[in-house]
Image (tube, rainbow, N blue to C red):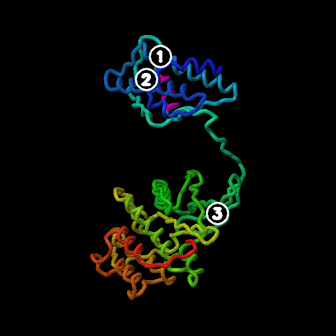
Amino acid sequence: MLDDLRQEFAEQEASSSLSRLYDDPEFGRMFAVLHYRLNLHFGSINERLRSGRHYWANNSRELIDLIARLREIRRDLKRSGIEIFLDERYETDVERCELWLSPSGGSSIPGDFEPIEIVKYEPVFHSSFATVKLLKRDESASLKMVGQGSYAFVYSYLDPNYGIKFAVKRAKKEIGDRDLARFRREFEIMKSLSFPYVLEVYQFNEERKEYRMEFCDDTLRGFIFRRNDKLSLSSRKRIALQFLYGMNYIHQNKVLHRDISLQNVLLKVYAGGAVLVKLSDFGLAKEHDSSFTLTQTEMRGTIRDPTLINFKDYGLPNEIYSIGWVLSYIFTGREGLKPNNDEVGRIVHKCAANDQVDRYRTVRDIIADVERLAAAPTDASA
């Protein structure tokens, strides 16, 4: 059967750009040909949507035959223990076309038929040779509460499939629609961010009103409080830079956190003392181009700029103040602004200047000054 398939598709046309997408030694050529033929039809259908909404008779029969042959190939290979998978988008588009394709006289394209998104630069076919079997168990995992806020509980659990700790953030049952919207928006913002120093979230469960995320071992407050007499300047500097890199990233993505606290900066702690800073709790975050905002809410532990009169006016200078306050804690282990008696103090007080005009303009500027801090090399990891 494999020999017959190789022979069938060996001489059929396929573009070189699509052929490059498939390195499957058994089915690569067949995948490229089928992908090419589907794209030709989908492109023609999109063109007819703009002029007449009638798909010609020959083209209709060819697409009907192509779909039938594709299903036949998948069925025959499955009997031999080989599964062929078609990208979900194309699987849906094939089904949409079948609803109106006619074998004679051409086919009328329905008025509500949406254009097809044509995939050119990624494969749409895969074989079971190129996939991995994912475990799916119905086992339950015990949750351990590790924290709570005004509208959600946070739990940790050990995943039975991987032996790795994850966290679950679950909305409290008694919260109203306003806080549920805030909770859902928090997940959406964090899901849109992808950076080493931003907490990663994975999956939102609408039924339970919860989402999964990576587990962190400690908060910035707890980590430094327990090690303040042992942390070197080099270690503090590396922690500070990770925090700043994360803040710079979210600002570059037009997001203001608006809820910076020593509890909302988390750390993953590794063997040997290495740590990885993770920004979390984006429940009050606001995107630059978003009209979604919440200004009346409980803000536990939030570092508040004393020059901010109304939270709805919160802007980058107010975030810079909070950043300076966190930097002061990282370098001193004390909550409050460090005196302006050395280079670290100068950086902190430039972040927190009473006149906002005198503050740093961007986090990138703060990074430049922190990177210049003289810190002796050390073998200790952070």
Left or right of 232 on screen, residue 325: left
Residue at which label 1 appears: 62
Q: How far apart are marks 1 and 2 (CA)?
A: 9 Å
Is 98 part of what is drawn in magenta?
yes
**Image coordinates for residue 141, horizontal then vertical, percent:** 70, 57
**Which of the two discs, 3 and 2, labels the residue nearer the N terminus?**
2
* Cβ atoms under marks 1 and 2 closer than 8 Å: yes
Going from N to C along the chain, the mark reached first, 3 or 1, is 1
Q: In this view, does 153 lie to the left or right of 239?
A: right
Quickly name the residue at label 3. Answer: 156
Q: Which residue is drawn at 62% across and 39% down?
A: 131
Question: Label 3 to label 2, Cα distance in Å?
Answer: 50 Å
- Secondary structure beneath dot 3 equals strand
Q: Where is residue 125 in the image (x, y as percent from the top left)?
A: 54, 32
Amino acid under disc 1: Glu
- Residue 14, percent from left and from top: 46, 24
Residue 171, by quadrant, is: bottom right
Q: In which quarter of the image is the C terminus?
A: bottom right
Q: Which amino acid does label 3 sit on?
A: Ser
Q: Is mark 1 on a helix, strand or loop?
A: helix
Residue 269 appears in the figure: yes
Along the line of sight, the residue nearer the viewer: 237 or 363: 237
Sequence-wise first label, 1 or 2 = 2
Q: Classify 10 Å Cα crowding around label 2: few (below 14), some (14-19), many (20 and above).
A: some
Seen at 49% across and 72% down, the residue is 238
Q: Say which of 155 and 233 sits in front.
A: 233
Q: In this view, does 83 lie to the left or right of 300?
A: right
Say which mark, if any, is on residue 41. Answer: 2
Q: Mark 1, residues whose alpha carbon is within 10 Å: few (<14), some, or many (≥20)?
A: some
Give the residues in magenta: 90-99
Q: Which of marks 3 and 1 is in front?
A: 1
